[in-house]
């Protein structure tokens, strides 16, 4: 098989798209589709290599194939992981426990399934996740492990019928696209699976909540479509065989198709976002991935044709340099982004992006020259022999091994901890939030529960005095628990609470005696789930008739259902005379929120104090300083 520089150029376009998307989603909303381009190219080239080896030797040496793949992929990966682990140990020890599972999953190439299991997909933010991008390498490596076994069977049984097999593989890719379209869950997806009363987009598998659309995005089966599309095309379009047939003079026509393919890829990268306002793009899951793969094949067909200009144009020195180092660029850019911005889903500025590139490019070049290329060419043994001959290099190697040992022990020994500002505030709420009160035991219940001859001391319990100021909320209010409690309010706030959860909490506090005559009640609900008149009516029906005012807070979040929820909340005083509105949606513009644009715990206590004072002013309590 000849070297195809045009495919390196196509890799360059793919990796640049991914890096721009990871830096700032709005710059290139569909840049993540570069991964699908990689999948198609990988399926095409790996299948060509296996067919070529079988034709040359009459068999496929699986051991040698896997050895070449491991030698190509593992060294740079493990070096990157080692560098990230050392950084965490030295400068970010608070993230040791939270990233430990990522290291284990990445080491065994199962990152995609680990992320599905723990709910750490591309839509998840507020976490330091320097290895999140390795999900795609896990999908490819799983393909590299399984596909040669399938190819051995196909080459033995269908050696003279490969074009027919290729068509079946392409049809299998179509079938996968259809299955993904059917399984895809449309509409707004709940933030997490335990939102009370709203679980759209989540399913239970093996007793675990799974985000369905994230599983479709990360899963080995659902993303095998691009790999199989490339593999099937390799059985139909073999560069050397094409030049012996009637298509050898069709270079210009193929160049025209390549222009169409490139235009489609760029159009999808510019227009097709993954997730917006908690809604996963339906066009992406209902044909977007498949069409990106087909567009990639149009470019591959021309780039692999010796008489087409596409290969020469895409194989220009700049694109070829980027393409040959695309693996390293992909490996190193993401952890560098994470180190700069501190957590996922925060957009880099132009200056930060350029700084990240100034770090990524030389690290990638060093990895390519001194790690990837020598080991790929089988020079590892000579490199180790050189260490034994050079005492200084040996000492340096021993120091690195010792440092890695300390790093490994540090990661393993880290105690479980809450990670991220929002996570910490939620953990604090487990002990500091509203207390569960039980109904006082009455005299009658005590007497009924004892035997006739027993002697008991009967005590009477005074009725509990209701709390004058009660607040029920979700994760935003969790961030202000300490401030509101210190100001004299009774708080019951919980992450992922929905309208049904608020209703049940009102019932609980009413029956416990904490909510009753004269209680002023503040409610914030609607960030995690859509709600309508019926949900609000169900909440209000449980509020004691002799309670004081009920204050509903508007919501600040870039979530699909929030505008409608705010419209509903602002209209409540018309229906319920005792309801007043606290306009958090508007007033929140005066403070700096977390990068997700929702929570109030990421930039010191200023936002939490402002939020608390907004509530305190509404209910008539003194402000806090």
Image (spheres, rainbow, N blue to C red):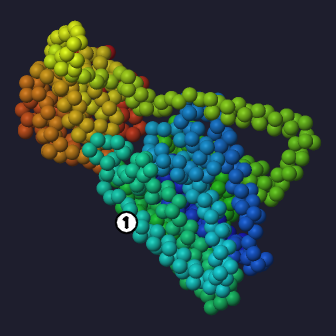
Q: Is residue 330 left or right of residue 493?
A: right
Residue 142 versus residue 412 in the image, above or below = below
Q: Is residue 207 left or right of residue 531?
A: right
Residue 387 versus residue 313 in the image, above or below = above
Residue 316 versus residue 455 in the image, above or below = below
Residue 231 versus residue 532 in the image, above or below = below
Of the 4 image quadrants, the one containing the C terminus is top left
Residue 449 % position (x, y): 22, 20
Give the residue furthest to the bottom.
246
Q: Quadrant of residue 524?
A: top left
Q: Residues within 10 Å of mark 1 (few under 14, many from 20)?
A: few
Which residue is depicted at the point 85% across and 34% down?
395
Give the residue furthest to the front.
453
Of the 4 image quadrants, the one containing the N terminus is bottom right
Residue placed most toward the observer, 561 or 519? 519
Residue 158 % position (x, y): 64, 82
Which residue is depicted at the point 40% across and 55% down?
212
State whether residue 100 appears in this view.
yes
Q: Quadrant of residue 268?
A: bottom left
Which residue is depicted at the point 56% across and 38% down?
99
Give the residue furthest to the right.
389
Check disc 1 and report its element: helix, strand or loop.
helix
State whether residue 555 appears in this view.
no
Which residue is depicted at the point 63% across and 33% down?
412
Q: Which residue is mark 1?
A: 182
Residue 100 % position (x, y): 58, 38
């Amino acid at each position: 098989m000849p070297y195809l520089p045009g495919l390196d150029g196509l890799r360059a376009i793919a990796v640049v798209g991914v890096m721009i998307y990871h830096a700032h989603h709005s710059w290139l909303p569909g840049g993540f589709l570069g991964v699908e381009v990689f999948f198609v190219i990988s399926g095409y080239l790996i299948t060509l290599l296996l067919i070529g080896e079988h034709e040359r030797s009459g068999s496929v040496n699986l051991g040698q194939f896997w050895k070449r793949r491991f030698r190509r992929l593992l060294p740079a990966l493990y070096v990157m992981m080692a560098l990230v682990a050392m950084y965490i140990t030295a400068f970010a020890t608070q993230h040791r426990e939270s990233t430990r599972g990522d290291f284990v999953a990445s080491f065994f190439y199962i990152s995609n399934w680990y992320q599905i299991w723990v709910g750490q997909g591309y839509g998840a933010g507020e976490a330091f996740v320097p290895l999140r991008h390795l999900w795609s390498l896990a999908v490819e490596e799983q393909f590299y492990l399984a596909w040669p076994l399938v190819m051995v069977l196909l080459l033995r049984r269908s050696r003279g019928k490969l074009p027919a097999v290729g068509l079946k593989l392409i049809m299998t890719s179509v079938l996968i696209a259809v299955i993904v379209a059917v399984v895809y869950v449309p509409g707004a997806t709940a933030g997490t699976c335990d939102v009370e009363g709203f679980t759209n987009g989540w399913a239970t598998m093996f007793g675990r909540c799974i985000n369905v659309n994230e599983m479709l995005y990360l899963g080995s089966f659902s993303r095998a479509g691009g790999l199989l599309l490339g593999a099937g095309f390799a059985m139909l379009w073999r560069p050397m065989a094409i030049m012996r047939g009637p298509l050898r003079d069709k270079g210009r026509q193929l160049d025209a198709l390549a222009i169409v393919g490139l235009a489609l890829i760029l159009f999808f990268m510019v227009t097709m976002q993954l997730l917006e306002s908690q809604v996963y793009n339906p066009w992406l899951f209902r044909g977007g991935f498949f069409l990106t793969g087909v567009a990639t094949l149009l470019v591959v067909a021309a780039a692999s044709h010796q008489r087409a200009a596409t290969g020469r144009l895409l194989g220009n020195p700049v694109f070829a340099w980027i393409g040959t180092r695309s693996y390293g660029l992909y490996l190193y850019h993401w952890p560098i982004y994470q180190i700069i911005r501190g957590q996922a889903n925060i957009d880099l500025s132009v200056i930060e992006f350029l700084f990240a590139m100034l770090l990524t490019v030389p690290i990638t070049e060093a990895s390519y020259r001194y790690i990837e290329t020598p080991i790929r060419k089988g020079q590892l043994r000579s490199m180790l022999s050189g260490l034994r001959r050079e005492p200084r290099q040996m000492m340096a190697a021993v120091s690195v091994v010792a440092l890695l040992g300390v790093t490994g022990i540090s990661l393993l020994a880290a105690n479980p901890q809450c990670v991220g500002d929002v996570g910490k505030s939620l953990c604090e709420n487990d002990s500091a939030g509203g207390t569960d009160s039980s109904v006082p035991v009455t005299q009658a219940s005590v007497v009924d529960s004892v035997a006739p001859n027993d002697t008991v001391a009967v005590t009477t319990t005074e009725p509990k005095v209701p709390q004058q100021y009660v607040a029920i909320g979700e994760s935003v209010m969790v961030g202000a628990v300490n401030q509101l409690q210190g100001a004299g309010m009774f708080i019951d706030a919980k992450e992922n609470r929905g309208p049904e959860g608020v209703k049940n909490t009102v019932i609980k506090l009413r029956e416990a005696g904490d909510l009753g005559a004269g209680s002023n009640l503040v409610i914030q609900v609607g960030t995690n789930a859509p709600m309508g008149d019926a949900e609000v009516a169900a909440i209000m029906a449980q509020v004691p008739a002799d309670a004081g005012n009920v204050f509903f807070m508007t919501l600040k979040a870039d979530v699909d259902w929030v505008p409608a929820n705010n419209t509903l909340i602002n209209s409540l005083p018309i229906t319920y005379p005792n309801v007043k509105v606290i306009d958090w949606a508007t007033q929140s513009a005066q403070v700096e929120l977390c990068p997700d644009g929702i929570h109030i715990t990421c930039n010191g206590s200023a936002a939490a104090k402002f939020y608390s004072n907004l509530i305190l002013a509404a209910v008539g309590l003194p402000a806090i300083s």
